[in-house]
Image (spheres, helix red, strand yellow):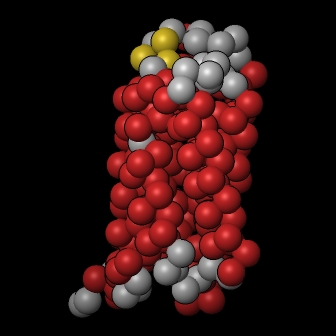
Amino acid sequence: MSPAEDPTNRYAPYFAFAGYLVYLVCGFIGGAMPNESFGQAVSWQLGSGGAISANVIAGIWLARRGEDLAAAGFTMLGIVYGVYFASIVIEHIDVRMGAAAVLLMIPAQILITFCRLFPIWVKVAGVIVCVLFIVSYITVVFGTASPIGGWQTCSYIAAEFLAVIWGVYFLKAARRAD
């Protein structure tokens, strides 16, 4: 049996979608908590864990579908969220370390644009998310960023919604295959 025919492969899009939902929900819960509080850190760590899982699962699923470049992009994005996870220490968020992940996000998003499941507008949204994170990175490098500033908040919210949109397209593809 080939990897693409593995019966467990059919559940991968559902697990990826669930991970993206965890990322979105925990992002909003953490955003509602006091800055750099224990609750915010734990919520954002859980959300990052959901994003790591979702992106790695999406990468494997896409590779089995023959979409190797997009699979590599999602795997790289799993690494990006690993860096974000590591930058969140209980009651302290290392903004500089988190910003460094932006340098990995750009090639990951470029590779993700090769995914045949996504319409053009979703690919453009990925580029917009990159631009938001680049602006956020610049504010951190020049020392004008606050820990939970406007650019940081906007870039993460955009990334969270984009991830859920990817998950929806994965679910559509999975349902077509059934």
Q: State left or right for residue 135 relative to residue 93.
A: right
**Residue name at image x 53 percent, y 75 percent:** 113
Query: In this orientation, does residue 16 appear?
Result: yes
Q: Position of residue 34 (x, y in %)?
A: 69, 11
Q: State left or right for residue 96 relative to residue 79.
A: right
* Number of dots carrying numbers: 0
Q: Position of residue 16 (x, y in %)?
A: 52, 60
Q: Where is residue 77 in the image (x, y as percent from the top left)?
A: 43, 55
Quadrant housing the C terminus: bottom right
**Residue name at image x 51 percent, y 9 percent:** 91
Q: State left or right for residue 158 relative to residue 46.
A: right
Q: In this view, does 139 lie above or below 11?
A: above
Q: In this view, does 82 lie above or below 89?
A: below
Which quadrant would residue 143 be assigned to in this image?
top right
**Residue name at image x 69 percent, y 35 percent:** 151
| Of residues 26 and 87, the one drawn nearer to the viewer in this rendering | 87
Which quadrant would residue 107 be assigned to in this image?
bottom left
Q: Is residue 117 above or below residue 144?
A: below
Query: In this orientation, does residue 160 appear?
Result: no
**Residue name at image x 24 percent, y 90 percent:** 1
Q: Position of residue 177 (x, y in %)?
A: 56, 89
Q: In this view, does 37 lie above or below 21?
A: above
Specify the farthest residue to the left.
1
Q: State left or right for residue 16 relative to residue 59.
A: right
| Of residues 127 and 83, the one drawn nearer to the viewer in this rendering | 127
